[in-house]
Image (cartoon, grey):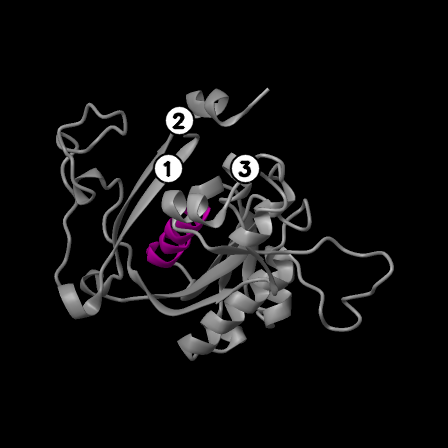
Amino acid sequence: MAAGNALAFQPTSFLGNQAFTPSSSSTRSTGTGTGTGTSALSMVTTGPLKCRPIGIGSAAPKTVITNVDLESVVETNDEWIRSRTGISERRVLLHPNADYDAEKDGEFESIRTLASDAASNALEMSGLSPDDIDLVIVATSSPDDMFGDATSVAAALGCKNAVAFDLTAACSGFLFGAVTAGQFLTNDGNTYNNAIVVGADALSRWIDWEDRNSCILFGDGAGAVVLTATDDVGDAGILGSSVHSNGLGYKDLNCR
């Protein structure tokens, strides 16, 4: 793996105000399998982050590709896919059609629109207004704009007071984004009180639709969470995180 991350969230109905103390370095896992600690909490590299989730949201494209649909594309079948992955269908973004202006008709879908919709749903659940948001992070490996989509998402939401930037960490992107936002909200003397973290990807743009081993696995979509700062570490919604990276695994993620 190129990067990895794990979060320990505190469900208030289960742990209440119980505080979590990170393990010492002597029991912390090194990420190589040689550490003495084996549980998820013994691997934490940060202590509790003084923030908690107050809203979640998601968005997916309208176009559905079922396992049966894929039977006409590659040599596979619904039973083979279900028994190995549990997947029955996936949502995908359509490529723009030069003969049809979907954006004009209000049907245009992109990573940017999915991220904005997911964040809007999370913001609505949180009860906050766009002006309350201080930070917007979009975790994606397939942005619409090579310079980043977070600023466009913040603009779409009306978050005029927010700092916005993209973060790329592949499959771990959303978790890295949540930890990064948590650090902003936890930092003493900070002026950040509320953050939106979005994970959004359109991997259908990059997969080989003739490879039955990979095309069955991926789809497109977005998920978001609103995090708010807490005054007391006992009210923390993130007990800790375990962040590791291994660039030596690059060769295992690329085919030539």
Q: Are marks 1 and 3 in contact (CB under 8 Å)?
A: no
In the image, taking residue 97 as reference, residue 58 lies left or right, namely left
Q: Is residue 232 in view?
A: yes
In the image, taking residue 107 as reference, residue 214 lies left or right, namely left
Tell me what residue is drawn at x 14 percent, y 58 percent. Answer: 19
Measured from the top left, where is residue 34 in percent x and y? Answer: 19, 23
Residue indicated by mark 2: 246
Residue indicated by mark 3: 212
Among the two numbered marks 1 and 3 on one chain, the one whose residue lies closer to the N terminus: 1
Residue indicated by mark 1: 4
- The image shows residue 107, relative to residue 79, as above or below, that is below
Locate residue 117: give its quadrant: bottom right
State the extent of the magenta-drawn residues as a range.
173-188
Q: Amino acid at mark 1?
A: Gly
- The image shows residue 231, relative to residue 94, as above or below, that is below
Measured from the top left, where is residue 42 in percent x and y? Answer: 16, 40
Q: Is residue 246 magenta?
A: no
Q: CA distance from mark 1 to mark 3?
A: 26 Å
Measured from the top left, where is residue 135 in percent x and y? Answer: 49, 60
Which label is found at residue 132?
Answer: none
Q: Are marks 2 and 3 in contact (CB under 8 Å)?
A: no
Compare residues 22 and 142 and report the one nearer the observer.
Answer: 142
